[in-house]
Amino acid sequence: MRVSESSIIARKNSASWVGKEVTIPVAEISSMGWSAGGEDDDGGVYVMRGYSRSWVLSGASEEHGRVVISAIEDRFPAFPIADLTPASLLFGDDSGITTLHLSKGQENRL
């Protein structure tokens, strides 16, 4: 991965992408972050382009990802780092688990 004031250039090395590079202009990036991954991806550092993620450092551990993001933020302060994407498009950041603290007798009254 190479980063400049105007773009990120990422090279992916996998069976389907051997040695291919993708250039993502900073103007298209809304935020940057790290994810543990999921079903079809290895996780790592990503950039958000609209509502889609583009992986720029696949497979990076959380610690490595945070170090990389911090270094980019220090070197390029105007770079869009903060991930402003809500946890849920429907409920925003309030979509986490809510504990109701109901006593045993009140559980069936909801």
Image (cartoon, rainbow, N blue to C red):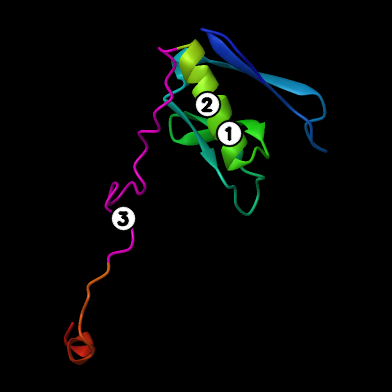
Residue 51 inside the magenta-drawn segment: no
Residue 91 inside the magenta-drawn segment: yes
What type is the residue that disc 3 sits on? Ser
Q: Which residue is mark 2?
A: 69
Q: Is residue 93 left or right of residue 27?
A: left
What type is the residue that disc 2 sits on? Ile
Q: Which residue is mark 3?
A: 95
Residue beneath the point at 56% across and 12% down: 7
Residue 32 lies, in percent from the top left, at 48, 29
Residue 2 lies, in percent from the top left, at 65, 15
**Badge 2 vs badge 3, beta-carbon distance below 8 Å:** no
User: Magenta residues?
Assistant: 77-98
What is the spatial separation of the Cα atoms under label 2 and label 1, in whole angstroms? 6 Å
Residue beneath the point at 57% across and 47% down: 36
Work out which quarter of the rendered image holds the C terminus and state it. Answer: bottom left
Which element type, helix, strand or loop, lies under badge 1? helix
**Badge 2 vs badge 1, beta-carbon distance below 8 Å:** yes
Q: Is residue 9 left or right of residue 26?
A: right
Residue 30, quarter of the rendered image: top left
Which element type, helix, strand or loop, lies under badge 3? loop
Q: Which residue is mark 1?
A: 65
